[in-house]
Amino acid sequence: MPALIQVRYATSSSPSPLKLSKGRTQIGRDLGCGLRLEDQGVSRDHGAFTYYIGVLMVEDHDSTNGIFVNGARVKRQVLYAGDRVKVGPTEIYIQKGSAASSPDTP
């Protein structure tokens, strides 16, 4: 099953849903990015979401302004439902992220 996120662009009051399928989704201003953000505070190749084997991650590609998860700047972070990611003025809410691990899981 894909990961689900809600993207709230700075220019819109309502969030836009986006499914992240297996693999990498580039984040940035470049035309080829899967999550294209048209803001000068966002790098052309700002970072990426990676979703593989039930694990959703976000990583920063050495951008000037960084990626923030729940208010803290991160280089790479596993994401779970309820996490909030900020890229420039864009806020991204994780609806369905990584499967939570159980203490009984080997």
Image (spheres, rainbow, N blue to C red):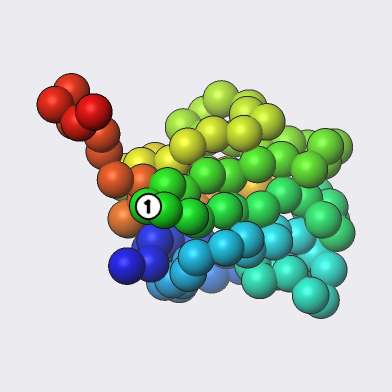
The C terminus sits in image quarter: top left
Furthest residue in direction left, as rendered = 104
User: Quadrant of the rendered structure where residue 34 is?
Assistant: bottom right
* Residue at 57% over, 53% down: 50
Circle 1 SS class: loop
Residue occupied by mark 1: 54
Would you place residue 37 above or below residue 40 in this image? below
* Residue at 52% over, 29% down: 71
Residue 42: where, in percent of width, then height? Answer: 78, 52
Q: Give the camera-side residue of 17 and 13.
A: 17
Residue 61: where, in percent of width, then height? Answer: 78, 43
The reply to whether residue 13 is visible in this rendering is no
Q: Give the camera-side residue of 56 and 91.
A: 56
Q: Amino acid at mark 1?
A: Gly
Residue 96: where, in percent of width, then height? Answer: 32, 55
Q: Is residue 72 left or right of residue 82?
A: right
The reply to whether residue 64 is visible in this rendering is yes
Furthest residue in direction bottom, as rendered = 31
Q: Is residue 13 left or right of residue 2?
A: right
